[in-house]
Image (cartoon, rainbow, N blue to C red):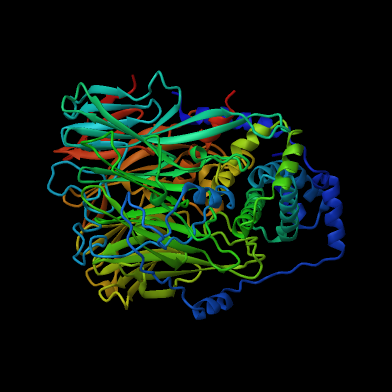
Amino acid sequence: MEYNLDCVTDAQNGDMEAFSKLYESIYKDLFRMAYYMLDSREDAEDAVSETVMAAYEGIKKLRNVALFRQWVFKILSNKCKNKMKQYYSRNLPLDEEVTLMEEHTEQLDQAHDVKNAFRALSMEERAIVALSIFGGYKSKEIGKMLHMKEGTVRSKLSRSMEKMRSMLQE
Amino acid sequence: MKSNEDYDETLINQIKKKSEQIEIPESLEPERMIRRLNKKKKSRNIFVYRIAFSAVLCAFAMSLIYVSPVMKHEVFHSGVAVAGSSVKTASSYAEVMRILRSSNSNTNSFGLIEGSLEDSSATNSASSSKGVDGSTTGGGNNYSDTNIQVEGVDEGDIVKTDGSYIYIADQTETQISIIKANAESSSVVDTINLVETSNKDSFQIQEMYVKDDILSVIITCSYMVEKDNFDSSDSYEISEYKEYTMLKTFNISDRQNPKLEGTVKQDGYYHSSRMVGNIIYLISNYYPYFEFSHMSVESCIPSVNDSQVKPNDIYMADSPQTASYLLITSVDVNKPSDIIAAKAILANCDTIYVSNENIYVADTIWENEEQNSDETEIMKFHYDEQGNIEAVATGRIKGSVLDSFSLDEYNGNLRVVATITTYGEDNSAVFEEVDDSDMKTDIISVSTANTNSLYVLDENLNRIGSIEGLAEDERVYSARFMGDIGYFVTYHQTDPLFAVDLSDPANPKILSELKIPGFSSYLHFWSDNLLLGIGMETGTDGNEGVKLSMFDISDPENVIEVSKYVVDKSWYSPTLYNHKAVLIDSEKNLIGFMVEGEDQVIDAYSSTWKSDYVVFSYDSQNGFELKLRDNLYTNNGTDYMDCSGTRGLYIGDNLYVVNPEQEIKVFGLSDFQLKGVLNLLN
C-alpha cells in the first residue's frame, strides 16, 4: 500500500491527483479480487468500475481516513456478491458457447490453476479468501466487512485454504 | 513451532504471485479511469439516497406473510420407492442429473422440498421433549461435559473427558492423545496417530465423541484426482478436488491399546454431528464436480461407504438452484462399519438444529426476483433410537437464522428467531452503515433494512404464531429458549434483550425489552432466575472487551442486568462463536473461557497480543469475580499460535486447562493455584 493518509484527506477536498494516487495503489488488487470472485473478466471490470465510481462519489463522507482501503474493498465485495446472487437467482441455463469462449481466452492466463482453485469455493468462501489475499485483511476485519462472525471467517478461511492448497500443489 | 498459519503464508504468497500474471483491462488503467472520473465530475449526477427505513419497514409490515402449506403425501419408507407419488424424492439418477445440469454451481440457495407427514409413527409425539434446553453442565457427574445445546444430544469436540481420562485431538499433528487425569501426576497413556502412511490424502481431525469404552473420531480428507478433459480443443488438464468425511470408531477398553473397530465414510466436507444414545449422526456438505458434457452417476450422485445414495433417499426441490448436497447418515458405534440410514438433500444448508427427536435443516434462500427479502427453508427429519431417519415436513419463513440456537423445539412446536433483510428497488446494497465503533462510514445509498421476527411453527412446520417487526435496523445476535419463555438479543449499537412469553404458541408476547450497550453472543441459563450472557461491550469510551452479563429473569416482565464484567484487554473470545469453547457450571460456580487481547502497544498501528484463559465465579452479593487469568501464549511479533482450541474442564477438585497443541495446566479448584503442567508436544 503506497499511499498515505494525507492523500485521502486531499482527495476528500477534491484533489484529483491525490485520488489518482489512491487508485493506483489498489486497482490491481481490486481487479484480481473481482476476477476470482466472479470468474469473468468482463464482470470483474464492471464491478471495479462501479466500485471506483462509488468511492469517488462517496469519499467525502468517509470519516475515518485510515479505513479508506478497507472501505473500498468492502464496496467491491458487496458489488461482487450482488452480481453473484444475480447469476444464481436467475437460474440461467448454462450457455455453453459463452463458457467455451471464456475458457479460450483463459488459456492465455497462466494463472489457470488459481482460477480453478477459486471455482472450488462457494460464493462466501471466495469473498473471504479474496479479501484475505488481495485485500490483505485479517479474519476479524473480514468478519466486520462481511457481517460474519470472526470465528466463522477463520474456519471458512482455513477450510478454503485447504481446498485450494491441494489444487495448487505441483 | 509450525502451524497452519505457516502453511497458509506460503500458499497465499503462491496465489498472489500467480495472480500477478493476470492482465488488467485497459479501461481500468489509472489514466483512463481518472479521465472518466473527470468527465463525470463535470456533469455531476450524484444521487444521494437517505435511509428509507421507515418507508421500507412500513411496506414490510403491511405485506402478506408467507405461509407454506404442507401437503399431505404418502409417507416414504427408506428403501421402498413409492410408485408414482408426489413426494419429491428422486425417481432415478437421471432425474437428479437433469436438475444438476440446469443449476449453477456452489450456490447457497435451497429450493422447496415437500416432505410428508403421515401416521404417528413418523411424527414426534405431543409429549414434552425428553431433555431440557439450556441446562448447565455437570449434571450429577463429578466432572464437566461439553457445553451442549440440548441435553441428551451430545455434540463432538476436540477435547473430551469421562472423569478419568482426557482425550485431546491435535489437529495439526492429526493425532489423539489419551491422558490419565491425575492432577499434577497426569500423564499421556497413549497416542493414536490417524494419518495412514499408505494413504496420501490430506487428513484433518474434526471432532470426537467418547462414550464408555468407545472413542469415535470424525476426520475430513481431501485429495486431487487428475481427470482427462473431454473437450479436445482445450489443452489443459482438469484436476478434481475431492473431499470425504470419515468416522473411525475405536475400542478403548484398554486405554493403552486402542483398537480400530470400524470406519465409515461419506462424500463431502464435515458440517456437524450429534450423538444420541449409541447412534452418531454425521452431516456433510458435498459439492460434486462434474462436467456438463460428461455427467455420470459416479460424478453427480453422492456416495456413502462407496455406494451411491438411492434415488428415493435423495430429496429434491421443485426448481433447485444449487449443485450441492447435504448428506446425513446414522451409525451405531457398536456396529461402526455399517451405515444405518443415508439421506441426501439437494441443498447447501447453513444451520442444523437437532432436538431430542428431530433434525431440522435450515437453509437461506437469497432475495431474488420473486421475493424482496431473504427467506429460510426449514426441513424436518424425524430420527429414532435405532438411527432411522424419515422426512416429516418442510416450512418456509421470511428472514435468515443466525445459528442453531435460533431454533428450539418444545411440545412439538418449533420456535424460530430470524432477522429479515429487505432489499429496496436498487438491488445493490452499495454502502452500509457499519455498526462498530472503529469503522463509522456514512450511508450514501441504502436499499436494505433489517427487522426481526419470532415465529412458532407446528409439527408440520405451519406457522401458528408470530411476532414481527421487532428491533428495526438490528440483527439477532443470540437466542436461548427455556420452555414457555424465550430470550433473544438483537444489536445495532445497543443490545435489547427481549423476553418472549411462548406459553400460548399462537400468541407469542414480548414481555420485556432491556437495552444495554454492547451485545450478548451466547445466552446460558445459570439458574431458574438468572440468565448469563457472554458477548462484547462496544463502548466508545475505550471500555471495550469481552463482557459477562448476568440478568435477573425471575420476573420476565422486568428483566434487569444485575451484574456486568468487561474483561480487561480482550478483543476476542472463541466463546462468542462456539458455545463448546466455554466451561459453565453453576453448581461448581465456574465460567471459564479463552480471551485474546492486546498485550503491549508498539506504535500507532500495531501492538503485540496475548491469549489468556480466564475463570470467573458469580454470587449475588459481589457479582462476577475473576478467579484466574492464566497466560496461554504471548506473541512476540513473528510467531502465531491460535489458542481457540483451548478447553477448560474439571474432574473432582481439579481444573484442567487444555491447549490441544501445546500443554495441559492443572489448577486446584479451591485456590486456583497451578499444580502442574503436562507438555503435549512430542
Residue B474: x and y, percent? 48, 66
Q: Nearer the viewer, residue A22 or B63?
A: B63
Which residue is at 42% across, 22% downward? Answer: B199
Quadrant where the image shows the N terminus of chain A: top right
Residue B551: x and y, percent? 28, 63
Number of disc labels: 0
Q: Is residue A46 above or below residue B531?
A: above
Q: Nearer the viewer, residue B145 or B361?
A: B361
Quadrant where the image shows the C terminus of chain A: top right
Q: Nearer the viewer, residue A25 or B178?
A: B178
Q: Along the horizontal axis of the image, is B65 left or right of A137?
A: left
Residue B665: x and y, percent? 26, 31
Q: Along the horizontal axis of the image, is B569 left or right of B260?
A: right
- Viewer can see residue B476: no
Residue A83 appears in which quarter of the rendering?
A: bottom right
- Viewer can see residue B647: yes
Q: Along the horizontal axis of the image, is A100 left or right of B616?
A: right
Q: Is residue B221 above or below residue B292?
A: above
Q: Nearer the viewer, residue B524 or B319?
A: B319
Which residue is at 84% across, 61% downward? Answer: B41
Residue A153: x and y, percent? 49, 45
Residue B259 appears in which quarter of the rendering?
A: top left
Residue A128 appears in which quarter of the rendering?
A: top right
User: Residue placed farthest to the front in the image?
Assistant: B83
